[in-house]
Amino acid sequence: MNYPNLNDARILRCLANYILIQNSIIHSIQLSLSKKITNKFKLMTVYGIPNCNTVKKSLDWLKAHKIDFDFHDFKKKGITAEKLNDWCNTFGWEKVLNRKGLTWKKLSKEKQLEIDNQDKAITYLINNTSAIKRPVIEKDNKAILISFEENNYIETLG
C-alpha cells in the first residue's frame, strides 16, 4: 500500500483551509451585496390610510417590485405640523390638500375658501387627516412621491 507522506497531508489541510476561507469571503461578499440591494430603499416610509384605494395601489406596486418600506397610518398615528410643512414645501400645499376627497367636499364653500394658504391648510389637515393627499412616500425622511402614478414610481424608484 502507498500511504501519503506527512507533507502531503499538510498540503491537503492547507488547501482545504484555503478553500474554506475563499468560500467564506465569497459568502460575505454575496451577503453584503444582497443587503445593499435590499436596503436601497430600506429607509422608506409610506404615509397613508390602509383602506384608501390609491394607497393600496401604491403598496401593491412597492411589494411587486420588492421594495421594503414602513407604513405610517396617519389616521391612527396622526401627523405632525412639521411633517405636513415639509410635504407642503416639497409638493406645494395645494397638492397636499386633497380637494377631490369626500372630507373636503363635505366642507361648506365658505370654509373651503377660508383655507387659502399653507398655514391654514396645515391646521385643517392636522385635524382632518383624511383630507391629506395620499400616499406620501419618504426616503431618508425626505418626501419623494405623493399619490400614485406608476410612471413617477418607475422614474423615482426604478
Image: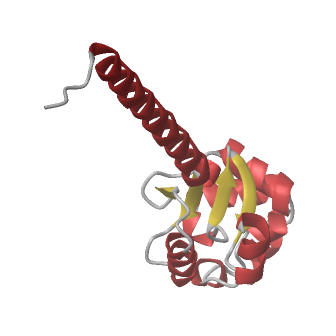
Q: How many numbered circles does the render carry? A: 0
Q: Quadrant of the C terminus?
A: bottom right
Q: Position of residue 59 (x, y in %)?
A: 52, 72
Q: Is residue 15 left or right of residue 128?
A: left
Closer to us: 74 or 25: 25
- Extreme residue in the front direction: 1
Residue shown at 65%/84% (left/top)?
105
Q: Position of residue 96 (x, y in %)?
A: 74, 66
Closer to us: 152 or 20: 20
Q: Image quadrant of residue 124?
A: bottom right
Vertical arrangement, residue 74 with respect to residue 146, above or below: above
Q: Position of residue 47 (x, y in %)?
A: 57, 60
Colour convention of the picture: secondary structure
- Extreme residue in the top direction: 6
Residue shown at 86%/60% (left/top)?
117
Residue shown at 34%/17% (left/top)?
10
Q: Is residue 74 left or right of residue 153?
A: left
Closer to us: 72 or 28: 28
Q: Quadrant of the N terminus?
A: top left
Q: Is residue 147 left or right of residue 57?
A: right
Q: Position of residue 46 (x, y in %)?
A: 57, 60
Q: Image quadrant of residue 82?
A: top right
Vertical arrangement, residue 22 with respect to residue 45, above or below: above
